[in-house]
Amino acid sequence: MSKVITKKALAESMKTLMRERPFSKISVDDICKSANVSRRNFYRHFPDKYALLNWIYYDDYFSKLIYHDDCVVWDYFPQICEHFYNDRAFFRNAIQVEGQNSLRTYCQELLYPLFMRDYKGTFISDKSAEFYIRRITDALFEYMKEWLKSEPCIPPDKFAAHVRKSVAKHARRTWEIASREQYQFIS
């Protein structure tokens, strides 16, 4: 088997297994058996099942996003939702994985440069940019987590539009509140 074919077979095996059960209940042996690939061959391609999962995020989903210079991060949100929706059974389990190589971490790394570009010049420091962008991506991730778990799961275009509208509404209200004159307390 060629390197690409083996990696694809392992990825298909992992996705099939994750559509049936949580990631924590899947072993490298399970993946290898399902893919008809030896453990030794698995470790030639991936150091562990977490690395395989990370490769799946990139190869099967996020490498297919179409980037445009004139788009803002919110323009990509419907595409991301569409990818998640099209394989909900897989992503319902993938979204539960925490820590290194988690979907949350992957999404943060994917969206961070887009948010940095879109919000350039609005941060006091790199540290405040890091903090703010992590909070935005965490909030989006939690929205998506709840959405994917819901039954029935509303279509991705409607979900993405709802989230974007909600964020815009809350941002306007936050601006109104934060920009009003400070109340002077009488001592």
Image (spheres, rainbow, N blue to C red):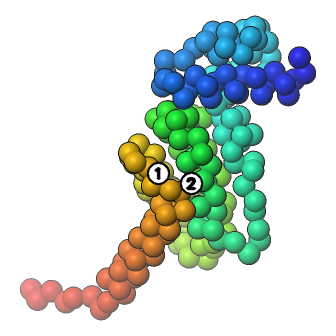
Q: CA distance from mark 2 to mark 1?
A: 8 Å
Residue 175: x and y in percent read 39, 82
- Residue closest to the eye, 112 or 103: 103
**Up/down of 152 relative to 158, above or below:** above
Q: Secondary structure at mark 2?
A: helix
Q: Residue at x 69, y 72 (%)?
A: 71
Q: Residue at x 41, y 70 (%)?
A: 166
Residue lying farthest to the left in this orientation: 187
Residue 179: x and y in percent read 37, 87
How dense is the environment of label 2, judged by Cα within 10 Å: few (below 14), some, or many (20 and up)?
Answer: many
Q: Is residue 3 left or right of residue 81?
A: right
Badge 1 is on which residue? 144
- Which comes before the other along the chain, label 2 or label 1? 2
Badge 2 is on which residue? 81
Amino acid at dot 1: Met
The answer to whether one can see residue 116 in this image is no
Q: Secondary structure at mark 1?
A: helix
The answer to whether one can see residue 62 in this image is yes
Q: Residue at x 61, y 25 (%)?
A: 16
Q: Quadrant of the C terminus?
A: bottom left
Residue 1: x and y in percent read 89, 17
